Amino acid sequence: MSRHQVAWNGVTRVATVQAFGDALPVGSVNAGNFYHDHTAGDTNKNNDAIGFNGTHVLYHHVRDVMYANNILDMGNVTIAEDVTYVALTGVDVGPSTSAKTVGQTQQLTVTPTPGGASNVTGVWTTSHPSRATVSSTGLVTAVGAGVATITFTSTDGGFTDTHAMTVTV
């Protein structure tokens, strides 16, 4: 599932659907956000940039966000899609393995597929914090003997990849 935000311009009455975290269009405020599944291989989706199941679904997502912000007159609202959005289809964490001694660090990187994906944010986790910790930027610190699996999970689509760190004393 990917997360999107609705940028609302009260003057032009345009609600722009865009990737969560993207810069808001000039004159707009963030009206809220929603999750929408646009997994690869979904034969029911339109071939638009965000991958919504037609304008009906798009309208209902936007309507819910707008109603939550007391913007109740949806009859006079134009819904626009941010066509610059490129959906993420996968991630690769590099390097895939490392061997460190306690106290050493390893900076991990995420390579998105496609390379021009709009939203490459995500969350780093560790399988064993007593062996290796990981920061929000992918910096892994070896803290205790053993093997720890570091996982990156993307915000857009929930794609994952891992890094295996072997820690020695």
Image: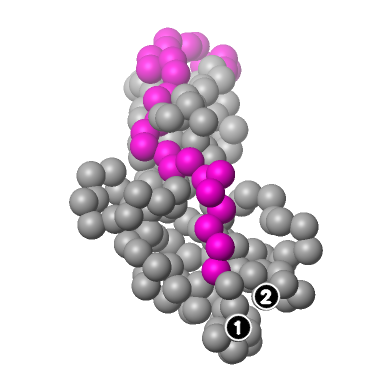
Amino acid at pointer 1: Asn
Residue drawn at the location 59% of the way across and 89% of the way down = 72
Residue drawn at the location 21% of the way across and 51% of the way down = 43
Pinpoint residue 97: horizontal percent, then vertical percent.
38, 15
Q: What stretch of residues is rendered in magenta?
A: 79-105
Residue 144 seen anywhere in this rendered image of the structure:
no
Position above or below: 129 against 9: above
Amino acid at pointer 2: Arg
Disc 2 element: loop
Does the magenta run of residues contain 90? Answer: yes
Pinpoint residue 65: horizontal percent, then vertical percent.
54, 75
Q: Quadrant of residue 106?
A: top right
Describe residue 11's horizontal placement relative to residue 32 as left or right: right
Q: Along the line of sight, which residue is nearer the eye, 26 or 47?
A: 47
Does the magenta run of residues contain 24? Answer: no
Q: Quadrant of residue 66?
A: bottom right
What residue is pinned by disc 1? Answer: 76
Residue 113 seen anywhere in this rendered image of the structure:
yes
Closer to the chain start, of discs 2 and 1, is 2
Residue drawn at the location 35% of the way across and 64% of the way down = 54
Give the crowd class for mark 2: few <14, some 14-19, many >=20 residues within 10 Å.
some
What residue is pinned by disc 2? Answer: 13
